[in-house]
Image (cartoon, rainbow, N blue to C red):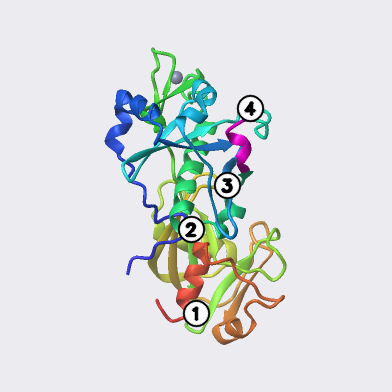
Amino acid sequence: MTIVNFYAGGTLDRATPLRKDSQALAGRLARPQTRILAYWRGRHLVASGDDTMAPLLLSPGEAPDLLDQGTPLFLGLADGEAYFALDVSMLDDISGHPALGAGRPMELRPLATRLDQATGSLLAYVQALMNWRQRHRFCGTCGSPTEAIDGGHALRCTDSACAAMIFPRTDPVVIMLVHDGDRCLLGRQGRFPPGWYSALAGFVEPGESLEEAVAREVQEEAGIRVADVRYHSSQPWPFPASLMLGFHARATSREIRVDQDELEDAQWFERDWMRTNLGSERFRLPPREAIARQLIDAWLEDRL
Ligand SMILES: [Zn+2]
């Protein structure tokens, strides 16, 4: 069974061939049916509903001033109509803008529980691209400014002698639930809310396989050795540019040695104890939107 985590499961057709067709994209930006999502200083502009939230969708005619100033980023097609994202961070105040004023700027993570899966995926896609552009305004080779091309999916150095191309980055992070049958290994960082434990995780290093990264991180953070590293599922995690790769692994040692630089605590938790205490003040887990919770639930429910 393929597991689709939150922030994945988008329904947009990315229509990648269109990215290189600047004439077609310009035509799309002249159509009233085209929809534009606005992004302002790390936040998405959303329209409030009763229980759920959705992006504020502008038509090109509502935002001619903004289109003149920014470079719209082509996202793809939905029901045959084009969707773009536009960074409007050049405005100091959006509340007074005739079109933007109807939206509320919100960061993606606090929004997640109020978005349906397809919208969560769409905004994760926007977030990842905006984070990347924000961090690559200058060429890493020669220091000249970069410019967006291919509908915003590539950046090119504006120094014609250099002309370096820069593409969006995705940084792999392994996240793993280690178990030894009836117990699993969970850790907590000092910044977590009280009682909150999660699966261990860490960045994959250069020259390392995913399985090796799992084993190294568990050994470094908790002093536990593992075997039988098995892939479970993945999750886009654009905070700022990660792809979480989820695994289960079997422990081959028992004695925990916590790396206090990485974790405040790590413990073995018994399955029955977890079921009894989950949700109490002494024991909380990440929300279901997080792949960590999916890994933990799969083990708790014997779905390995
Ligand atoms: Zn350059």
Q: Secondary structure at mark 1?
A: helix
Please, which residue is most extreme toward the left here?
17
Q: Which residue is mark 4?
A: 91
Q: Position of residue 83 (x, y in %)?
A: 41, 39
Real-space Cα distance between discs 1 and 2? 25 Å
Q: Nearer the viewer, mark 2 or mark 3?
A: 3
Give whichever of discs 2 and 3 has the lower sequence position.
3
Q: Which residue is mark 3?
A: 47
Q: Secondary structure at mark 3?
A: strand
Q: Position of residue 79 (x, y in %)?
A: 33, 46
Give whichever of discs 1 and 2 has the lower sequence position.
2
Q: Which residue is mark 1?
A: 300
- Residue 258 occupies which quadrant of the picture? bottom right
Q: Residues within 10 Å of mark 2 (few under 14, many from 20)?
A: some
Q: Nearer the viewer, mark 1 or mark 2?
A: 2
The stretch of residues the image draws in magenta is 97-104
